[in-house]
């Protein structure tokens, strides 16, 4: 029922003000490739350097820490050097993203170098989040409906990420084309009403804490996310220089939280 399942490390933590939440994208059996995933928000920055892992191998693999990782705030003409912590995540305590600023990520590993740029868009605001039942032939299914404000740029897309009890549950790229009166709507099928018939990775149970994040992203980022969903890992590459997968995203995070109570869903 979920859009995609997640095996391969790694992705940057998105909520630095609370607990760290990670998303693991699944890359199928492809030759080992470098992966760079870096997220800069108003709360901080986090980057992971890893390698793709075949689906029949154990995970996670160790992160790559023997690298130079620098983010340039092009707008403010400032440069920040990220250093790896004990878990292999590159961070910088002095860096907080600002909407409207252009950022450039530069990574060097031996003879290989990689670069990616991203402008931080204006933040969205989550207006509502609720579940409702829809009738399917096999059972009723809880659909998560999230409404949030539209960016003034009509070409803005959004990355809606859903966490269950602090762990990634699902995500989707949402287009602003469905906006009505400045409100964008994201919808996600979640758990069946009969929880005993649902898989552990998709089931929601009474009392589960559901955290929702919305990040405005460019069309390039949205295309990359959609390509992952479609199993196309070589399309819409976001780095220049040496070949690698992954992304660099500078985006403000809007957050909300709801508790799953199936007996209260209409």
Image: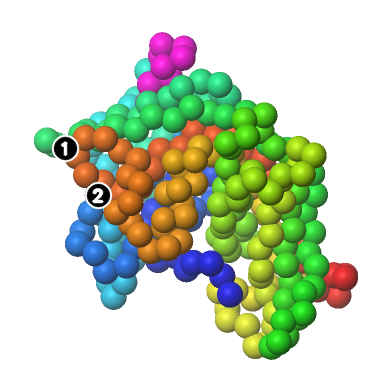
Can you name the residue that lies furthest to the left here?
111
Q: Is residue 256 magenta?
A: no
Classify 151 as above or below 204: above
Residue with the mark numbered 1? 112
Q: Secondary structure at mark 2?
A: strand
Q: Residue at x 26, y 46 (%)?
A: 244
The magenta segment is 71-78
Front-lying residue, 247 or 21: 247
Q: Residues within 10 Å of mark 1 (few under 14, many from 20)?
A: few
- Residue 232: x and y in percent read 35, 59
Front-lying residue, 68 or 114: 114
User: Given contact means CB atoms under 8 Å apart, are the residues at marks 2 and 1 in contact?
Assistant: yes
- Residue 155: x and y in percent read 57, 36
Question: On the rendered image, what quadrant is the C terminus found in?
Answer: bottom right
- Tag 1 or tag 2, which sits nearer the N-term? 2
In the rendered image, is residue 59 in sight? yes
**Left or right for 211, reference 128:** left
- Residue 177: x and y in percent read 64, 45
Classify 48 as above or below 151: below
Question: On the rendered image, what quadrant is the N terminus found in?
Answer: bottom right
Residue with the mark numbered 2? 34
Question: Alpha-carbon distance for marks 2 and 1?
Answer: 10 Å
């Amino acid at each position: 029922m979920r859009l995609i399942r997640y095996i391969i490390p790694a992705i940057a933590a998105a909520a630095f003000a609370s607990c760290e939440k990670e998303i693991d994208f699944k890359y199928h059996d492809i030759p080992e490739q470098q992966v760079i995933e870096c997220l800069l928000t108003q709360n901080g920055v986090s980057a992971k350097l890893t390698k793709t892992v075949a689906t029949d191998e154990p995970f996670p693999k160790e992160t790559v820490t023997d690298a130079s990782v620098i983010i340039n705030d092009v707008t403010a003409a400032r440069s920040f050097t990220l250093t790896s912590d004990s878990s292999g995540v590159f961070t910088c305590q002095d860096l907080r993203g600002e909407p409207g600023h252009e950022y450039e990520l530069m990574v060097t590993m031996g003879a290989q170098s990689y670069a990616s740029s991203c402008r931080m868009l204006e933040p969205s605001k989550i207006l509502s989040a609720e579940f409702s039942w829809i009738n399917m032939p096999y059972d009723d299914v809880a659909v998560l409906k999230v409404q949030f404000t539209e960016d003034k740029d009509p070409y803005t897309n959004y990355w809606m990420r859903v966490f269950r009890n602090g762990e990634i549950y699902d995500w989707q790229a949402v287009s602003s084309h469905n906006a009505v009166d400045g409100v964008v709507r994201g919808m996600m099928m979640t758990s069946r009403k009969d929880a005993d018939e649902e898989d552990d990775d998709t089931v929601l149970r009474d009392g589960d804490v559901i955290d929702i994040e919305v990040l405005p992203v460019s069309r390039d980022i949205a295309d990359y996310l959609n390509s992952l969903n479609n199993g196309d890992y070589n399309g819409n590459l976001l780095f220049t220089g040496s070949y690698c997968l992954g992304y660099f995203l500078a985006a403000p995070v809007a957050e909300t939280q709801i508790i799953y109570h199936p007996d209260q869903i209409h």
